[in-house]
Amino acid sequence: MSFKVQGWCPGALRPMASGDGLVVRVRPPSGRLTQAQAMGIAKAARRYGNGLIDLSGRANVQLRGVTPETHTPLITALTALDLIDANVASETRRNIIVTPFADATTYRLAEELPRRLNDAPELPGKFGFILDCGAAPVMSDIQADIRFERSADGQRILRAAGCDLGAPVREDEAAEAAIALATWFLEAGGVTDGRGRMAQLIAEGARPEGMLTPRIAPAPALPRPEPGRTPHGALIGFAFGQMDADRLNALAMLGPIRVTPWRMVLIEGLTERPRLDGLITDPADPLLRVHACTGAPGCLQAHGPTRDLARRLAPQVPRHKTLHVSGCAKGCAWPLPADLTFVATSGGLDLIRKGRAADRPERSGISASDLTSLSELF
Ligand code: SF4
């Protein structure tokens, strides 16, 4: 393995060092930002970072280019916006993704779950929850250990990752049931050396029977949403999930923001395309299907740059295909298989077809400048 596995997720209180400074990851409560919070983040990104803001695949917002000197005043500014947890432990536990298509009961659960998690036993750093309780699941391909979804007849169900079926739960028992399932995971031996995932435990044969009786399937999953109008507002994408502070500020003026794990934001109540540069509002835009991490020089682990190559190749990506350009085999930008993946190595680019960045390459030592046509590779 040619990359470093952290075993923990960076946060705001525990930022991650990168090639362009500290990366400060803000976890918007319930996946939502008020207009004042979003404008405050934009202002803080300009003042204490380099003005660039990433949307993460865990529905978080990352400020880049923060320095050890600006980190403390940045946390003070974000605390004033009500975006910072009491301590690193609370921040780490609040690993919860909420569908942008949530209803009021789901948002109530999203507020209650972090409170309950504060009193729960310690979970592995990457252990996460998904509240995917819109009309049908839209986050089936996003990794989480405990999931709330809807069945085909609209019941809220609680499901352990790796189990096909879930158990119906009432609103007043939902948070407690999720904590009980997490506790079962610990007691069933789900953690080794501080790490472990629910799906892995289930794959080994453990079942949460007795405390949860899985018997209902989630409704058939919908495909990943695309930019455009939804009943909740307008979904807007960004090339590689990155925007600058001016863009965020301008979007915040249009309405409250819901952050998604698809590196898009939903502007609540917005019914028209914003007239702003640097947004992806057309579902046909090939950049939506091209994934590229920060790469060099922004990431210390990168073996080469990524985004210029990804941008250059994007027009050649057919409508239903995906391209992933990764600075190393960790594959941060796209944890799923892609039709075509190029991974930077110390000896040029590796090529992987229909796989993940960490999979065995079909070819190695490719020079980026030699990559002109992809037509024979898709
Ligand atoms: S995949 Fe990209 S962002 Fe992630 S560690 Fe490797 S080079 Fe860095």
Image (spheres, rainbow, N blue to C red):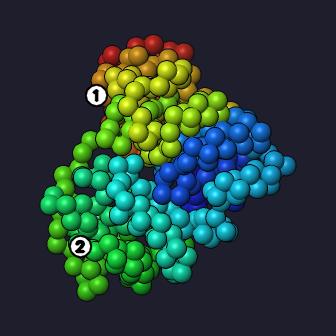
Q: Is residue 320 above or below residue 145?
A: above
* Relative height, residue 239 to residue 92 (above, below): above
Looking at marks 2 and 1 on the same chain, the residue that comes earlier in the sequence is marked by: 2
- Residue at image x 56%, y 37%? 252
Find out if the beta carbon at label 1 lies less than 8 Å from the nearest ligand 1 atom: no
Quadrant in which residue 237 is drawn: top left
* In front of the other: 230 or 334: 230
Q: How many marks?
A: 2
Which quarter of the figure has residue 219? bottom left
Which secondary structure lies at badge 1?
A: loop
Image location of residue 110, percent across then percent down: 44, 64
**In this rendering, the label closer to the viewer, 2 or 1:** 2
Q: Residue at x 23, y 73 (%)?
A: 167
Q: Secondary structure at mark 2?
A: strand
Per the image, the residue denoted by label 2 is 167
Compared to 206, does 5 lie above or below?
above
Q: What amino acid type should be assigned to the residue bearing mark 2?
A: Ala
User: Tag on residue 320?
Assistant: 1
Lateral position of residue 152 relative to residue 7, left or right: left
